[in-house]
Amino acid sequence: MGQKMPAKQLKQEIFKLLKTNPKKRFNSKQIIKKLGLTNSSDSVYDAMQKLAEDGKLYEVEPGKFRLDRFAKSGNGKIKAKRKLHIGKVDLTRSGAAYVMIDDLEDDVYVAPRHTNNAMQGDRVQVSVHKPRGRRKAEGEIVKIVERATEHFLGVIKIYSKYAILTPSMYQLEHLEIQVGLDDLKGAEDGHIAVVKVVDWGKSQNHKPIAVVTSNLGEQGGSELAMKSILINKGFELEFSDAVMKESEALNSELSEAEVARRRDMRDITTFTIDPDTAKDFDDAISYQVLDDGRKEIGVHIADVTHYVQPGTALDKEALNRSTSVYLVDRVLPMLPEKISNELCSLRPHEDKCTFSAVFIFNEKGKVEERWFGKTLIHSDRRFTYMEAQEVLETGEGDFANELLDLNKIAKKLRKRKFKNGAINFESPEVKFKLDDEGTPVDVYVKVRKDAHMLIEEYMLLANKEVATFIVNKGKEGGGEIPFVYRVHDEPDQEKIGEFARFAMELGFKMEFQTPREIANSFMELGKAAEENEALRMLQPIAIRSMAKAVYTTDNIGHYGLAFENYSHFTSPIRRYSDVLAHRLLEKNLSEKAYREDKGDLEAKCKYISGQEKKAAEAERESVKYKQVEYTSNHIGEVFDAHISGMIDRGIFVQIDHSHAEGLIGFERFDESFDLGNGRLKAVGSRSGRTFKMGQKVRARILSTDLEKKTIELDLVEDED
């Protein structure tokens, strides 16, 4: 029998093996065989990746590692010949790159000949040095740690023996990707196509080799831009034939045995509340008053795991995508439409399979009992947020009594949450009105009302209670049960200290000696920002100064929500983390605890967190594109705006109406400006004229660049 090693020992033993075989390459299966392990390939690969990030191993090709070629062993220790860092690539049009490294103040310049075929957004290991007589560091990319994408979208040019695709992303204009004539999938000269790279080439002089996966014909404009955003972030536009075949074979019929094992809640008042454009209704709320006067409220979640079984093509694809991606004008779903919009969508007047968290509340709005399990429900009504809000405001309409009482309890949950130290960051969410062609004709900021917050509070409750159930079951016997937690770390004191000094410059004093003081200060900042435009500019900066929420098996709690235990359980149609949570919860509803390999689960958590980050970046890019597209129709017009940032080249200004941000270059003034250390104000070198963060200004639209998603502005002086 083999042995199963904990993560720390696993890293040590892998490193020891490769040190004794410094010239050999190993993949995870070879490591398992050599060391006689029962650990999974995923957990071994994750350990090897961590060793690579530490600068100890080198990924020679995807999945294969050797002792790092820039390191040597001596006395049992690894000693770096050059300083190695992990960073993210930002390519320039010339083919050179800047590598952004968290622990270095300045980006590292990499000449075109030293980029090692790295692409935009790749995570790379770079050796850094400072050339004699130069102020800034330069580097050489020694390996690709993680490709941002294998797929590229661009224009096909066909030659006699092969074809070339030139990517549409402006940073990759220098790149030529070779496609065989038999791999064009019908694409003709000049067509737009998506390709998948199958061979990256062994050196800078070898072109990557690819095959066409989607032929888009002669598409252009906004349609091409949106698809480019998705492709460039590594998301595939279409599902494979195997995935679609499995999806289409599924049906909604339930066996008698399946019905019998579920709690039947079809007779209880149930409804959904979603955006008016939603098609996948993945959560529903039920409400009933019990004989003793207490209220039973059910949070019912689409039972995706009933249809998506482990090991299937559907499951592998869902993990690969990990999340649905929401752009301004479209959704790229995690699961095929047959599942997301039909089988699992909790549509009204249909019996549906759900996984439910059912709570019994006392008269004070506190949970006294909770139950988790598989159920059958029947939604009586589909509300849009606007329709539900009208009922809450007028007290009239379908299920008015139920909605009003649900809202009353939700407000108590919300009040209790903030009393416990939760932080309320209300970042503006920009929305667009689009015409039939997808072109933005107006921009507005989404207003969150009681109907939105009602649903939010019950989803938060279910997520918190599911995580708490798992934690308590582990405490009852046998120790920790590995689970997928959604965690948010406490703030870094140094970053918060910098932010506090920044806030002080704008007249807001923060207390930041303890995590609770920081939370209270952020709450006070939110209130003050409602009255002060300059302080409103601090909120997005405050968010950036905080840790980012991630998925992990290490339950450190959720600082921003002030929850000791928190998970994601409520959206399995669009988040794979929730699919995992459903499976683990179901297996732990029996008396005996179920424990999955923690290393395997942590590797999945890490991957899902990375996919979530890419999806968020894609969403922001689509919003920025539409903001620039909207602004393109207003060249020469003047708008109210305020100063949102400062760099050496000029002042960033955010237009009040569209929330679009543009640059007023300092070259438009007849003097230079000094920004000072904090970059909170710019002072004219000759006149002493001062511009401050948050200052109200008037700005004229000069030009826009849709490809770069940039706006050039000019300051409009007051006319006295």
Image (cartoon, grey):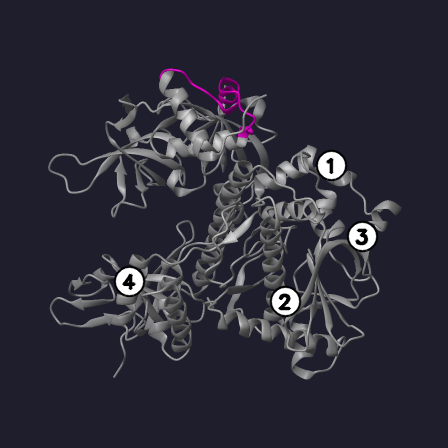
Q: Secondary structure at mark 1?
A: helix
- In the rendered structure, which disc, 2 or 1, sits on the residue that comes first in sequence? 1
Numbered disc in front, either 1 or 3: 3
Circle 2 crowding by C-alpha within 10 Å: few under 14, some 14–19, many from 20 = many
Amino acid identity at mark 1:
Glu
Q: Secondary structure at mark 2?
A: helix
Q: Secondary structure at mark 3?
A: loop
Circle 4 crowding by C-alpha within 10 Å: few under 14, some 14–19, many from 20 = some
Tell me the distance, in whole angstroms, between the alpha carbons under discs 4 and 2: 35 Å
- In the rendered structure, which disc, 3 or 4, sits on the residue that comes first in sequence? 3
- In the rendered structure, which disc, 1 or 3, sits on the residue that comes first in sequence? 1
Circle 3 crowding by C-alpha within 10 Å: few under 14, some 14–19, many from 20 = some
Can you tell which mark lies on residue 455?
2
Say left or right for 612 vs 176: right
Labels 3 & 4 near each other (Cβ < 8 A): no
Question: Image quadrant of residue 370?
Answer: bottom right
Can you tell which mark lies on residue 497?
4
Q: Residue 679 location, x and y as percent?
A: 24, 63
Say left or right for 662 vs 402: left
On the question of residue 333 being in view, the answer is: no
Q: Which residues are magenta?
A: 22-41
- In the rendered structure, which disc, 4 or 1, sits on the residue that comes first in sequence? 1
Numbered disc in front, either 4 or 2: 4
